[in-house]
Amino acid sequence: MRQKHGQNFLIDKNIANNIVRAAQFNFSDEVIEIGPGKGILTKIIQTQVKHLTAVEIDANLLAVLRHYFNFHNAQNIELINADFLKYEIPDKILKFISNLPYNVGTAIIQKILPLKNWTSCIFMLQKETVNRLAAKQGTSDYGYISIFTQYYADAEILFDVSPKCFNPPPKVISSVIKLTNKNLQKPEPLFFEFIKHAFSMRRKTILNALSSFKNLEKNQAKKILTTCNFDSFLRPDKFSISDFFCLTTEIKKYIILQ
């Protein structure tokens, strides 16, 4: 039966072990698992780390896990009934792991990545989403979420997971990705604001994206591109993170002048 939160529970123990192994946990690690579900990852992780916090939105699932870990007298795990998007992440060095819900996976990633106190994340998501997170400049998958992810983290796709490894089986293939914190400061808001705007019209040229942003005039947009030495007919997916930094640095000058 489909769960009320739309979960697809991992049931393959070999895959579960591979996911946890990819995290390279040790006994000094503080770990947060997002959405432990029925605990197939949780039961492995708990034996390998200093402390595990499992945040689960479904109170019924959490009650079953609580019974299991109480029965086994586990002292290093905290089970929290909460929506992770509303959960206040503790200010201590953390690793994250999750079979992320497909419908809120990217929102969860966007909550975690700007934080300074995480070192690595192992996430399983829909393969299509994972491909976007790790997409390279100039590819069809490259977009706003690619740049957001790769600004904050090194992204490495690890392996695919078949639908038959879940109950109920999803209609899509899943993939596991490792994110490693680059420990960079947040850029000024204009940086991601412009990137999101540019990719909202990804089939248009970068000149069109600039001249429709923040009331910039077309001649100002052309000057920005000339200063950065960019072809005005290129589309947004041809621009790297550093290219967008050049653009937003120049955009800022004209906004201030207005």
Image (tube, rainbow, N blue to C red):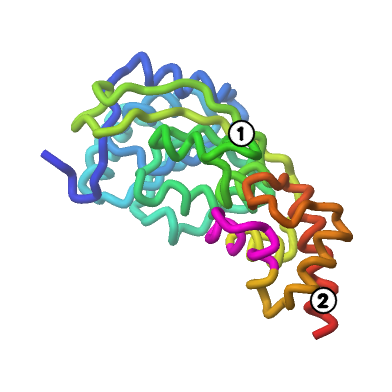
**Residue 170 percent location from the top left of the image:** 25, 33
The mark that comes first in sequence, 1 or 2, is 1
Residue 17 appears in the rendering: yes
Residue 27, relative to residue 206: is it above or below?
above
Residue 203 among magenta residues: yes
User: How many neighbours does mark 2 have within 10 angstroms: few (below 14), some (14-19), or many (20 or more)?
Assistant: some
The local secondary structure at tag 1 comes to strand
* Residues rendered magenta in the picture: 197-210
**Which residue is depicted at the point 51% across and 59% down?**
88
**Which residue is depicted at the point 56% across and 54% down?**
202
**Residue 39 percent location from the top left of the image:** 32, 32
Residue 110, relative to residue 155: is it above or below?
below
- Is 238 on the left-hand or right-hand side of 43? right
Q: Along the line of sight, which residue is nearer the eye, 83 or 239?
A: 239
Identity of the residue furthest to the bottom in this view: 258
Three-letter amino acid code of the residue under disc 1: Ala
Q: Which residue is mark 2?
A: 254
